Image: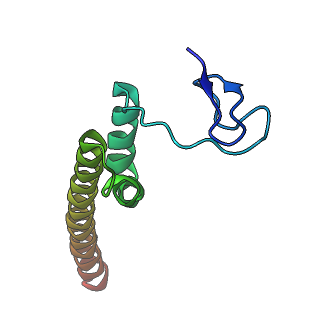
Amino acid sequence: MNQNCPFCNKEISPTDVFCPHCGNKLPDKKLPFSSVQRIKIYLVSIILAPVGLYWFFKYFKNEDLEKRKVAYVALYLTIFMIIVLIVVNFLFVDSWMKYINIYSQNNYNF
């Protein structure tokens, strides 16, 4: 089903981002997220924790309730993973400090 460009009123296809006749950027279509897109957003929010904030700020004021839900889930996952990374970092540093202290005590006590 073809539509008309809002600028030049010529026929365009539904998948066009720019009008092939006048070159203007067409208004964003309100397409829902696919399952693959959601999984990608959630995985990136977990693996690269601060990057999840990008999707939060992009979609948290969106009119579409589904996109707002995705934004808030990405925010929660990002915050959770940042907390986990901080805790793991402190545990790692603590274990290394204990190892260094034990090693230094053993080497200096002849």
Picture quarter containing residue 9? top right
Residue 6 picture location, percent across and down: 62, 39
Q: How many marks?
A: 0
Q: Is residue 27 toward the left or the right of residue 9 in the image?
A: left
Residue in the image at 21% along x and 73% along y: 98
Where is 96 relative to 42, above or below? below
Q: Is residue 96 toward the left or the right of residue 36 in the image?
A: left
Residue 53 picture location, percent across and down: 36, 60
Where's the N terminus, which quadrant?
top right
Foreground: 108 or 52?
A: 52
Foreground: 49 or 29?
A: 29
Where is 89 relative to 54, above or below? below
Residue 24 picture location, percent across and down: 72, 45
Picture quarter containing residue 100? bottom left
The image's colouring method is rainbow
Where's the C terminus, which quadrant?
bottom left
Residue in the image at 65% along x and 34% along y: 5
Foreground: 53 or 110?
A: 53
Where is 14 relative to 51, above or below? above
Residue in the image at 37% along x and 61% along y: 57
Picture quarter containing residue 18? top right
Which residue is farthest top? 1
Foreground: 89 or 110?
A: 89
